[in-house]
């Protein structure tokens, strides 16, 4: 009950602040699936604006389904309280708002999310079995999250079907306007300077810089994370499912998908050899 009480107290205090800030300026909402580099965007945008929100979900039906199905999700998390509040006070009322979302190569994104979720147990076991971690990832992690997020979230909340818009895969970003809502979509693999320029243009700010935050290899489990990446060899049917998905096909070029398929089927030790990188930097490899 203590955790639930803490969440509710935090939410009530935060809601009072949110109501006050929302009444002054149109909000900027970083709305994304998680583990796509959004924390850096939030931190950087907050250097210029106070009315900035960071959520993974706003769809009440989606949030309710997760709460019902997940054994460890009996009570709403603070992030979902904020998401539901934004949906009811901003989205449904069609208030002016700007949304920033990011996409990431789906397997690298899933591994990053898996480690974030496993962080506590990894800390308790300072020398976890890498093979066991790989087995747990393959059998227990909900791999469809990046593949279904736009349909379960943005399509239902903002009434934007992202797959109906041509995404410039080589450019790696675009923005669209739907009534009072503007949306910027970017690949997380873009160079930070490009992302910073995109955000600056979208928000109309000068001298915008992206501040690195929440980088997996710099966390307490960073060395284990890197061992995991270097040892994992993924089943071909899993790789095919992820890269044949409409998500991967919509946002990534054929060359990017080829590079990604190669690295996960051959392992990072071989994929990172000088002859096999395809010019793919460590940022793109999820390191």
Image (cartoon, helix red, strand yellow):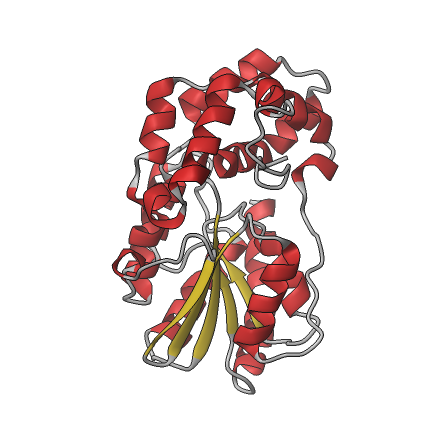
Q: In the visual, does 81 lie left or right of 10?
A: left
Q: Closest to the observer: 200 or 171?
A: 171
- State the image coordinates of residue 258 (x, y, percent, origin top left): 42, 32
Quarter of the picture holding the C terminus:
top right
**Where residue 272 sits in the image (x, y, percent)?**
62, 25
Q: Residue furthest front?
A: 275
Frontmost residue, 225 versus 139: 225
The image shows a total of numbered marks equal to 0
Q: In the rendered view of the protein, which quadrant contains the N terminus?
A: top right
The image shows residue 60 at horizontal and vertical percentages of: 33, 58
Which residue is rendered at x = 45% and y = 53% of the image? 170
Q: Is residue 29 above or below residue 40?
A: below
Rendered position, 26 above or below 240: below
Image height check: is 197 above or below 246?
below
Q: Residue furthest bottom?
A: 24
Q: Please indicate, yes or no, whether residue 250 appears anywhere in the rendered image.
A: yes
Q: Is 36 or 269 nearer to us in this picture?
A: 269
Q: x, y (%) of residue 262?
A: 47, 25
Q: Is residue 233 visible?
A: no
- At 47% from the left edge and 60% from the top edge, which residue is drawn? 173
Judged left or right of residue 187, residue 215 is right
Asked which quadrant contains residue 94, the reply is bottom left
Residue at image x 30%, y 62%? Answer: 165
Q: Is residue 67 left or right of residue 151?
A: right
């Amino acid at each position: 009950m203590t955790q639930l009480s803490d969440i509710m107290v935090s939410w009530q205090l935060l809601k009072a602040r949110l109501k006050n800030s929302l009444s002054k300026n149109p909000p900027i909402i970083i709305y994304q699936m998680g583990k796509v580099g959004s924390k850096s965007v939030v931190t950087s945008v907050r250097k210029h604006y106070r009315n900035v929100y960071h959520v993974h979900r706003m769809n009440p039906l989606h949030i309710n389904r997760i709460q019902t199905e997940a054994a460890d999700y009996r009570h709403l998390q603070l992030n979902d309280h904020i998401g539901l509040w934004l949906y009811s006070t901003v989205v449904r009322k069609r208030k002016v708002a700007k949304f920033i979302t990011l996409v990431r190569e789906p397997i690298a994104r899933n591994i990053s999310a898996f480690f974030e979720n496993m962080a506590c147990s990894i800390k308790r076991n300072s020398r976890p079995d890498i093979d066991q971690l790989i087995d747990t990832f393959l059998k227990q992690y909900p791999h469809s999250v990046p593949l279904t997020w736009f349909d379960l979230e943005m399509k239902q909340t903002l009434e934007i079907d992202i797959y109906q818009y041509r995404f410039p895969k080589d450019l790696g970003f675009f923005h669209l306007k739907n009534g009072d809502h503007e949306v910027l979509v970017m690949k997380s693999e873009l160079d930070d300077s490009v992302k910073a320029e995109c955000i600056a243009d979208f928000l109309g700010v000068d001298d915008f810089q992206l501040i690195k935050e929440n980088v997996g290899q710099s966390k307490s489990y960073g060395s284990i994370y890197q061992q995991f990446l270097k040892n994992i060899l993924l089943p071909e049917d899993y790789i095919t499912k992820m890269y044949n998905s409409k998500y991967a096909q919509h946002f990534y070029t054929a060359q990017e998908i080829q590079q990604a398929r190669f690295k996960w089927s051959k392992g990072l030790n071989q994929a990172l050899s000088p002859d096999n990188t395809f010019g793919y930097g460590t940022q793109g490899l999820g390191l």
